[in-house]
Amino acid sequence: MSFLFWYFPLINLVAFSIIGVDKRLAIQQKWRISERNLLFTSILGGTIGSGLAMLFFRHKTSKESFLLRFYGIIVIQILILFVLFYSGIIEY
């Protein structure tokens, strides 16, 4: 089995989970997970899990600064995929 076959579901599960944990901590008014760490899981490939968790838990959906950085990560990832496909490094 391919490394990516296991990596992407795992990192997306981690991203989904930590946003859920951060939401729970926010409700309990406890010490929170930093936005840097939340976004870092997206950078590592957990964009889908993070996005689904934001919708599911209704967390970080109204904070514009977070959303701008999150959408920026998505755009950069799409551009990277485009370049990799266009250059022939990754084939469909």
Image (cartoon, rainbow, N blue to C red):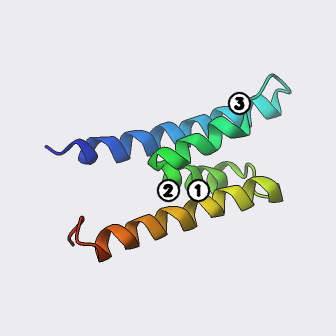
Instruction: Name the residue nearer the viewer: 15 or 72.
Output: 72
The circle on residue 48 is: 2
Instruction: State the residue at coordinates (56%, 68%).
Output: 75
Q: Earlier in the sequence, mark 3 or mark 2?
A: 3
Find residue 9 and report its horizontal and vertical position in percent. Answer: 36, 45
Instruction: State the residue at coordinates (36%, 47%).
Output: 8
Residue found at the very far left of the displayed protein? 1
Q: Earlier in the sequence, mark 1 or mark 3?
A: 3
Please count the marks in the image: 3
Q: Is residue 18 left or right of residue 65?
A: left
| SS label for mark 3 | loop
Q: Amino acid at mark 3?
A: Ile
Q: Indicate the quadrant containing the N terminus: top left, top right, bottom left or bottom right.
A: top left
| SS label for mark 2 | helix
Q: Are marks 3 and 2 in contact (CB under 8 Å)?
A: no
Q: Amino acid at mark 2?
A: Ile
Instruction: State the residue at coordinates (54%, 63%).
Output: 76
**Crowding near the residue tagged with mark 2, few <14, some 14–19, many ≥20 C-alpha atoms within 10 Å:** some
Q: CA distance from mark 3 to mark 2?
A: 19 Å
Find residue 69 and report its horizontal and vertical position in percent. Answer: 69, 56
Q: Are marks 2 and 1 in contact (CB under 8 Å)?
A: yes
**Crowding near the residue tagged with mark 3, few <14, some 14–19, many ≥20 C-alpha atoms within 10 Å:** some
Find residue 60 and report its horizontal and vertical position in percent. Answer: 75, 50
Q: Which residue is mark 3?
A: 33
Q: Which residue is mark 1?
A: 51
